[in-house]
Image: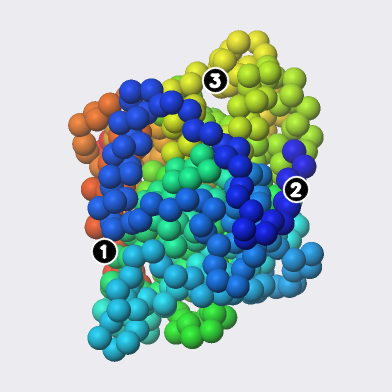
Amino acid sequence: MSPRKTTRSSSTVNTPHLLEPRRPGRRAGRLLAASVAAAACLGAAAVPASATGTAGSEPVVSRGVTIPEFYNPPARLPAADGALVRTEPLPLGVSLPGLDGRRMPGTATRLMYKSTDAGGGPVAVTGAYIEPSAAWKGGGERPLVALASGTMGQGDQCAPSLSLQHPLTIGEGTVSIGYDNIAVYRFLAAGAAVVVTDYAGLGTTDRLHTYVNRVDEGHALLDAARAARSVQGASVTSASKVGLYGYSQGGGASASAAELRSSYAPDVNLAGTYAGAPPADLTEVMKGIDGSALAGALGWSINGFAQSDPSLKAVVDANTNDVGKAALKDTSSMCVGDAILGYGFTNSKKWTANGKPIADVIAAEPKLQAILAQQRIGTLKPTGPVRLATGVQDDIVGHRQARQLAVDWCRRGGDVTYEAIHLPNLGDKLLTNHLVPLLTDQGSAISWLTDRLSGKKAFSNCWSMPLQP
């Protein structure tokens, strides 16, 4: 898949609604309504996607959706990984004036920085750094949390940095909710600085987001930690302790970053990693996603891998029918809300040329098997202590493959704290079994990571794995 073209437009031009939302099924509608309600509880204001431009920034149109010109990468990038390309002030969607004149919970800066993709090439990545107003409540100097967001989608309008500015976005056929903003604000309240990565291709207009590509995500997260040091007014330095935090797609990114840190970014002073519901084995995860509320994510995976390895395009074309090809193109510009509305509970058999599920197609294609095998997390020992949490009822990012990651790390001598989250079955394929543990475990996850950033020792429970569910 070749990089998409991006055209400039005047700020007065009305972008046509090229991504018309589909009528949701009853279950998909309930999920979307619950998500919108949750965002509303955070005080988020619904804004059209075309309203995401900033003052003095001419908007651009990326595959039918208007975003700030800031996200257009330059032709040349710096040589150093983590080097800043550009910055600008980022107004937070939820903030209050502080007694000392500073905004609470902090001052945000939009970032573009250089990273290296899975093919070894330079890539521009965007994100956001937030300098907290609160003093650090732990021991030592102020630390940094590098946060990897959970699944947001593949359209550039879904970038996590944009969701910090507009926690709830509805317009131009887009429904996007910044659900990870809660964790960001909790870390800021504790006095930790936070940097959020948008990942490779999510936001930036020169390429497609390489969804769940472990190397792209791990590099982007580590380079975000590097970039934060150079932000004007940042209190963090190369000596600052760094914590990695992520759930779902973000859990895979933080897990990958913990594995890659020793070889790729030894200068990042990693104190601890939280990996919640990590998609460590994509072969198994694809089976859980197929037919679920998040079935559209199959399209994001296929699109991303076909971009990273252009030779896969012929394999994809040969194994998809016209419906599948249209779905791949359609999902490439969608956020999570759009995918639930448009493709929730779709069986991948409708997309394949032979009428079999994508899992069967992969099993019959050695090249596809090899690609997914390369994405396996758990083949390397992670740096520092890791807390891995997984809901025992999770049927989207399967519990068993997440537990296996803990086993693999323990066998490699990792310092692993494994947490099996016990909840009742809240509905098969509805996303509830996957999303509720994010909320119920979040307080414990943040406390565990802030303890590591305060210098407190972690205690591995690898010894208990034979007894753990």
Tell me the quadrant of the picture where the N terminus can be found. top right
Tell me if mark 1 has few (under 14), some (14-19) or many (20+) residues whose alpha carbon lies within 10 angstroms of its own: few
Mark 1 sits on what residue? 447
Foreground mark, 1 or 2?
2
Q: Count how many numbered circles sit on residues in the image.
A: 3
Q: Secondary structure at mark 2?
A: loop
Give the label, 2 or 3, closer to the camera. 2
The quarter of the picture where residue 244 lies is: bottom left
Whether residue 370 can be seen here? yes
Asked whether the viewer can see residue 361, the reply is no
Above or below, comparing residue 272 to residue 333 in the picture: below
Q: Residues within 10 Å of mark 2 (few under 14, many from 20)?
A: few
Q: Amino acid at mark 1?
A: Ser
Instruction: Tell me the residue that label 3 is attached to.
Output: 348
Circle nearer the N terminus (1, 3): 3
Name the secondary structure under disc 1.
helix
Q: Earlier in the sequence, mark 2 or mark 3?
A: 2
| Residue 149, position as x, y percentages in the image | 45, 53
Please state if 404 lies on the left or on the right of 99 as rendered. right
What's the residue type where badge 3 is placed? Ser
> Which label is found at residue 303?
none
Left/right placement of residue 225 relative to residue 329 reads left
Q: Residue at x 47, y 50 (%)?
A: 48
22 above or below 174?
above
**Residue at image location 48% in from the left, 45% down from the top:** 171
Marker disc for residue 5? 2
Do the numbered discs 2 and 3 sit on residues whose CB atoms are within 8 Å? no
Task: Give the residue type that dot 2 points to.
Answer: Lys
